Image (cartoon, grey):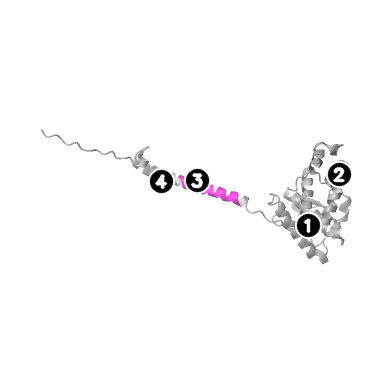
Amino acid sequence: MAKKKKQNKTKQSKPPFQRQGSLQSVKTVFPKRRRVLLVVGVLLALVMWAFIWRWRSPVDTRVLLDQETFPLSRYREMQMIADKVALTVDQVIPGQVESFPDSGIVCYIAPKAWNDDHLHPPPITLVGPKQNGEPESAHQNTVRIAVNDQVLSSTYAGEAEFVFELTHELAHVKMDARYDNYLVETFAVAVSLKVLRELGYNQYRNDTVRLYTHRLPEGIQSAIERKAWNEAALQWQSGALLR
């Protein structure tokens, strides 16, 4: 008898999508998955766009001097100084807080009666209802900065005083002017000294540093004058200010 030839049976590999079901079922399920993935992708894109829009490039700080309280003869000059201060503050503290007004910050000369008023002695940043004595440009519930009338002085300290006060209050705005404490005040003074140096008001800056230094205990004063920063830090940490 003739032997039957063995037929070589080759194993056919299953299609890649057939491992967990028939090929027909995959054809019907996969389009649904694609639709689900498409919807999810669109939703994620919308969420990411909202996130990017919320944290978009920082808005430049804009300071608008009040034409009613700043003298017309010096308005343009002092507005240019305010622009330089705002630009430098943006470089030192980038970004804006949520309470920053898109229309900018109004800055005006405070009434002289405010100098002896403990509620809002200038310089001060105001947020909320309009106060008695504020100019027409100070709209309610916007951020306003009131500076001392000393900034109009014709001496060397006048212009520098304006830079110091405006920088100090802009630092408060950067850290959210609705909150204030000794730590925030310390940072605001540090930013003012930094901007004074950046804009070249070195003499006024040095005088201001000496003014603050002379209020410290003698041991810390001596260490600062000798630039012995480690010694000054140790005395500071040891509680010398409380003695």
Q: CA distance from mark 4 to mark 1?
A: 61 Å
Name the element at disc 2.
Answer: helix
Q: Is residue 209 visible?
A: yes
Magenta-tinted stretch:
36-52
* Residue placed most toward the observer, 194 or 107: 194
Left or right placement of residue 45 versus residue 168 in this view: left
Q: Amino acid at mark 3?
A: Val
Q: CA distance from mark 1 to mark 3?
A: 48 Å
Left or right placement of residue 11 versus residue 169 in this view: left
For image coordinates 81% across by 39% down, the residue present is: 236
For image coordinates 50% across by 45% down, the residue present is: 40
**CB under 8 Å between discs 1 and 2:** no
Mark 1 or mark 2, whichever is nearer to me: 2
Q: Amino acid at mark 1?
A: Cys
**Mark 1 crowd level (few <14, some 14–19, many ≥20, 10 Å Cα):** many
Q: Which residue is mark 2?
A: 222
Q: Which residue is mark 1?
A: 107
Which label belongs to residue 31? 4
